[in-house]
Image (spheres, helix red, strand yellow):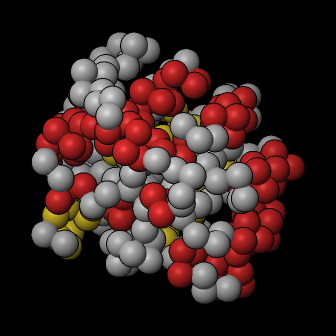
Amino acid sequence: MKNDQLPIGRRSVLRLAAGLGVTVAAGAFALDRFGPGDTAGEGTPAAPQGPPAAAGPPASSPRLRPSAYRLQPMTAYAPAGRPRALPPVRRRPFLSLTGVGRTMVLTFDDGPDPRYTPDILATLRQYDCRAMFFVCGEMAVANPDLLREMADDGHVVGNHSWSHPLVPKLRPSRIRDELGSTSEVVERTLGAAPLWYRAPYGAWNRHSFEIGAELGMEPLAWSVDTLDWKEPGTGTIVRRVLDGAGPGVIVLSHDAGGNRSQSVAALRRYLPALLDQGYAVTVPRR
Ligand SMILES: [Zn+2]
């Protein structure tokens, strides 16, 4: 099931863009044996995901009680199943794969959400494709079965913080709570801690890179933003994916955080179109 995963390497060629006064995704990401010559994904550098309220944390849902986790800080958490060697502390997130041919990575953030995630999983299953889900801890703890379904289908479950805060506004101890608690929930549910994380709103800072590395995770951003959280219409989301398609492109979409019915419907259209164009839709492996 995981044969189609891509090996990650050590070399990265990244560029920096400033925004929100912090490091924001922009540039290229090279995996092992993949050089900087392949610039796929650089044409559409990622940008901050709009105002926090619009893409906001799912904490507004009354059934979610992020305060519950705050009563049980897990600052001592360390992944039991950590890789043999912790990743280096990055200065920028990975933004795309290079040198992987007609391979693309689809990523879905903010879930799992029982209203939308099952449909996304079903579509991926229908086409036998793997994707990455960057989950929020407070959503994951409420939907462990969906987390297990992701893993059972061979998808990669990444860490998207516990409550979707703007990380650069947090003290390091809070960043560690946000990332550590989420990794702990994923590990407790799946038996393995996440190997990837993504900062909410694409807003990273030095502490998040350091803490992510301590927890055994690599930072992953994106190269094509569907802006699906703005609900631009299914056709617009489809067009953004297909217009942005290219070797090594990482696509950002959402399966939670608002009404994601357009995101669900769009996947049903652009996924078979990508496959028809000869793209392999898969996930990186570490
Ligand atoms: Zn998010």
> Does the image show residue 137?
yes
Query: Dividing the image into 4 quarters, which one contains the N terminus?
Result: top right
The picture places residue 284, in percent across and down from the top left corner, at 52, 39
State whether residue 250 appears in this view.
Answer: no
Residue 207 figure quarter: top left
Q: Position of residue 2 (x, y in %)?
A: 67, 29
Q: Residue at x 77, y 71 (%)?
A: 265
Nearest the camera: 187 or 227?
Answer: 187
Question: Within the image, what quadrant is residue 115 found in?
Answer: bottom right
Residue 181, image x and y in percent? 37, 33
Could you tell me which residue is drawn at 54 percent across and 58 percent down?
62
Asked if 16 appears above or below 20 in the picture, the reply is above
Q: Nearer the viewer, residue 170 or 222?
A: 170
Q: Position of residue 245 (x, y in %)?
A: 59, 69
Query: Which residue is pictured at 54% across the width and 60% down the height?
Result: 61
**Vertical placement of residue 249 versus 6, above or below:** below
Who's the residue at 53% across and 81% down the image? 230
**Residue 74, picture quadrant:** top left
Q: Could you tell whether 44 is left or right of 258 in the image?
A: left
Left or right: 79, with 212 as reference point: right
Total marks shown come to 0
- Say whether residue 199 is left or right of residue 92: right
